[in-house]
Image: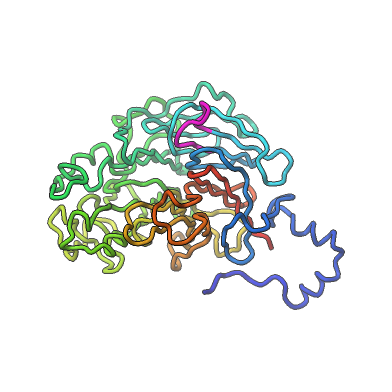
Amino acid sequence: MKTGLQPFFSGKKYALLLLLPASLYVSSCQQPGAGGGGVVADSNNVGLTLPAGFGALKVADSTGNARHITVNKNGDIFIKLEDAKSGHGILMLSDKNGDGKADERTGFGNYPGTGIILGKDYLYVSSNTSVFRYKLNEKQQVADTEHPDTLISGLIDRGQHNSKSLALDDAGNIYVNIGAPSNVCQEKDRTKGSPGMMPCPLLDSAGGIWQFKADALQQGYATGKRFATGLRNVVGLDWNQADKAVYVMQHGRDNLHDFFPELYDTKQSAELPAECMYKLFQGADCGWPYIYYDQFQEKKIVCPEYGGDGKKAVTDKYENPVVTFPGHLAPNALLFYTGSMFPERYKNGAFIAFHGSWNRAPEPQAGFFVAFVPFQNGKPSGKWEVFAKGFAGKDNIASPSDAMHRPCGLAQGPDGSLYISDDKQGTIYRVIYKQ
């Protein structure tokens, strides 16, 4: 497979390098563009398998259920914990000696949640019902941890698909996922034989992406705008600067074989539907709960709860995905890479953290990796590929709980490093390009 990476030690460059003093060679491998200051990869890349030229180090461990993360211009890492730990739902990690390892932790915000993102002047953080903002000082650190502004409140939380993931555009808007508290909008959720509701009443307040103002307080459903609908649950979303659009990764539906064994065998149920990346615009409808995307037939298939038979397709009305992935991998973060550390082929491409799902039995579990999709001119330009794997610690995972680590959040550092969070053991990884 063509990787786009060029060999470093070749021809005259290699001969000249051999003539350099060892001290100069070590220094050249520690410049900001090659790992940032004195940062070097761990000897075994923290157990991760990466493309040639990349390395990884462990920044921190045992932080808690580390969901989404963001990094400020000084390299401080903000982590949103799914559950508050020792009274803190948000952690800030700092590296005081420049070795890439966090040596100071502070915490604040005693509430659960997933979403966290930095704007120019504020840190935006979500609970499962609200979005808050914290004013930043000149060091891009939170000036007052005790008194955040409440931007948005009153969003539904019925215990299922309740994370409120966030994205900011460059026009002063903030986008919030409001996942549907349902599998496929049946009259009785996740019940065999229960029909799907038409129209689905959940779509008035969930199952989509809502747009709010990033600088207005005390917003809610009445003042926000449903930007896009027909999305069962989106944990990973990001603003694509090159394309000036919001992109999302949807978690696909479950239980095809459980509810319709006459239509789907266990292998089909494990592999369907595709996990889909969508490009959104105002008014976009991606089709949930009425359809799913079958990556093998390359069609939008009518869900059996709505009269489908596994083959009946629709050709219009609903959006087509721009990229598809195997089913039940649980995409939990999406990041468009704008840094300059990684080789040029990664510029403006998309990284996706796959958390691993439960609904692949009796097939082996899958996911637990970070994927990459190359983009050019704001559009996918090649097939997706596995960028980082080894988080699970072993192959043939029978249950997601057997995985040692589960990647969840992604962030880009000021030097172009890629940060990855793990919400199983709370490990924070940093991927650098070493050459």
Residue span colored magenta: 79-90
| The quarter of the displayed image where residue 220 is located | top left
Picture colour scheme: rainbow
| The quarter of the displayed image where residue 11 is located | bottom right
Tally of numbered discs: 0
| The quarter of the displayed image where residue 383 is located | bottom left
- Camera-side residue of 145 and 315: 145
Q: Is residue 324 visible to the viewer in this orientation of the structure? A: no
Q: Position of residue 417 (x, y in %)?
A: 61, 52
Residue sticking out furthest to the bottom: 11
Residue at point 85%, 66% (across, down): 20
Q: Quadrant of the C terminus?
A: bottom right
Q: Is residue 378 visible to the viewer in this orientation of the structure? A: yes
Does 87 lie within the magenta span? yes
Residue at point 52%, 56% (across, down): 393
Residue sticking out furthest to the top: 147
Residue at point 59%, 42% (across, down): 61
Q: Position of residue 112 (x, y in %)?
A: 43, 32
Q: Position of residue 327 (x, y in %)?
A: 34, 59
Q: Is residue 238 left or right of residue 185?
A: right
- Camera-side residue of 29 and 346: 29
Q: Main secondary structure of the magenta part?
A: strand
139 over 395 or under it: above or below: above
123 over 44 or under it: above or below: above
Does 193 lie within the magenta span? no
62 over 246 or under it: above or below: above
Q: Position of residue 291 (x, y in %)?
A: 22, 55
Residue at point 50%, 59% (across, down): 394
- Camera-side residue of 367 and 345: 367
Q: Is residue 152 left or right of residue 372?
A: left
